[in-house]
Image (cartoon, rainbow, N blue to C red):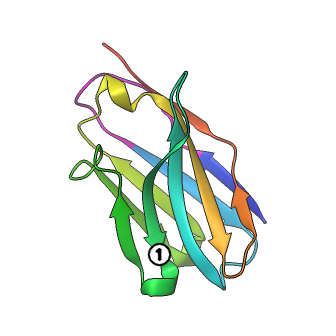
């Protein structure tokens, strides 16, 4: 299983970006799939997750609620993170991850998002 994240870049505050994570491998028996981020000098944190095992419910970090939306396209084996109204505190390396039922967890290489004026 391989995950490839893309879509990062440099944007100004208030602008939007959409990240994509393409999965090469089985999309069956997934527990959850989500986006994480790690800012310089900080620990990695969960940004958003889709819990497949509970019917596709979504959860978001408080800091991104109302601004970010996680979604997936099964036909394209791709997960997305739509990020609106970005601010400098959103600057981080964003990574996607999949957890299969009973394990294991897979990670993709991150994509850098920089929000700066």
Q: Which residue in the protein does label 1 denote?
A: 51
Picture quarter with the N terminus: bottom right
Where is residue 75 shown, x and y percent of the image?
55, 78
Can residue 7 be seen?
no
Q: Is residue 59 left or right of residue 97?
A: left
Instruction: Relative to 27, say whether 104 is above or below.
Output: above
Residue in the image at 63% along x and 40% along y? 110
Figure quadrant of residue 30: bottom right
Residue 112 among those drawn in magenta: no
Instruction: Relative to 31, say whether 111 is above or below.
Output: above
Q: Is residue 23 left or right of residue 47?
A: right
Return the residue nearer the eye: 80 or 102. 102
Where is residue 93 shown, x and y percent of the image?
55, 34
Q: Is residue 56 left or right of residue 33?
A: left
Where is residue 77 shown, x and y percent of the image?
60, 71
Range drawn in magenta: 6-17
Residue in the image at 27% along x and 32% along y? 15
Q: Is residue 19 left or right of residue 77?
A: left
Figure quadrant of residue 114: top left
SS for tag 1?
strand
Residue in the image at 20% along x and 52% along y? 66
């Amino acid at each position: 299983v391989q995950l490839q994240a893309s879509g990062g870049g440099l944007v100004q505050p208030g602008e939007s970006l959409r990240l994509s994570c393409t999965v090469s491998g089985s999309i069956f028996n997934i527990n959850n799939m989500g986006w994480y981020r790690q800012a310089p000098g900080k620990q990695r944190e969960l940004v958003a997750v889709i819990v497949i095992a509970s019917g596709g419910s979504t959860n978001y970090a408080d800091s991104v609620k109302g601004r970010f939306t996680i979604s997936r396209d099964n036909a394209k084996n791709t997960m997305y993170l739509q990020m609106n109204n970005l601010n400098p505190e959103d600057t981080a390396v964003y990574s996607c991850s999949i957890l299969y039922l009973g394990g294991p967890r897979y990670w993709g290489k991150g994509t850098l998002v920089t929000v700066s004026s």
